[in-house]
Image (cartoon, helix red, strand yellow):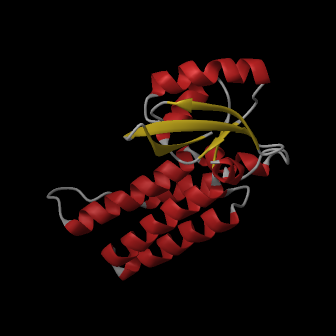
Amino acid sequence: IDGFYTRVKGQDTGMVVAVDLGNGQPVAVAQLDEYNLEAILKWLRPLVEELGVEVIVSDDLEVYDQAAKALDRPHQVCRFHFLRWVMRALRELQDLLAEEWHDTLDEIRRLVRTMPPQAKHWLYLLSKRIELPKGKRSPSADAVYRLWLLAHRLSENWERYTLFLKADQIPGTNNRTEQAI
């Protein structure tokens, strides 16, 4: 599933498309705002039931994860989108954090690129090692907090990023959806 915006009758309009990732063919298109969870669920629920959807693959938009949970389906976040936001966050942190944190950044970088089976646990342990600064806020303290938040988020949501590693029929990206768009 993925959304996009286009002009309909001169107005910017949200559209969402669902694609069968087996054959890459669109199965449904709707004119709705992809940020509206209620609208997404109203449109997606009958598709999930009628087509027997087992897994939802999407970009990293949070509403798709919320929809997958509401529909009791596993959610695979597109690996391309995942790597893009994680690497961007790591680059930003590299510029903000002192040299002493660069090994930690490199370790996170390695784990998200290689996705070893123990990565979730290692990310959790890594987040536990990060001591959050106490007291007055500062750019340095904020950067350490952002690093902790990144490691914690990765650990907590690791299944969403690696579901494709557990089953051959689950694609790691939503490229077919974007190609259909």
Q: Judge from the rendering whether residue 179 lies leftward or rightward of residue 37; answer left or right.
A: right
Nearest the eye: 153 or 30: 30
Where, by quadrant of the figure, is residue 65 drawn? top right
Q: Residue at 47% across / 45% down in the picture?
A: 6
Q: Residue at 62% across / 52% down in the picture?
A: 121
Q: Judge from the rendering whether residue 60 lies leftward or rightward of residue 97; answer left or right.
A: right
Residue 131 can be seen, yes or no: no
Residue 166 can be seen, yes or no: yes
Nearest the eye: 74 or 59: 59
Residue 108: x and y in percent read 54, 66
Residue 155: x and y in percent read 55, 50
Residue 137: x and y in percent read 17, 59
Q: Residue at 64% across / 56% down in the picture?
A: 79
Nearest the eye: 1 or 145: 1
Residue sticking out furthest to the left = 136
Q: Judge from the rendering whether residue 19 lies leftward or rightward of residue 87; answer left or right.
A: right
Q: How many marks?
A: 0
Q: Residue at 47% across / 51% down in the picture?
A: 152
Where, by quadrant of the figure, is residue 1 drawn? top right
Nearest the eye: 68 or 107: 68
With respect to residue 25, does 66 lie above or below? Answer: above
Residue 165: x and y in percent read 77, 51
Residue sticking out furthest to the bottom = 99
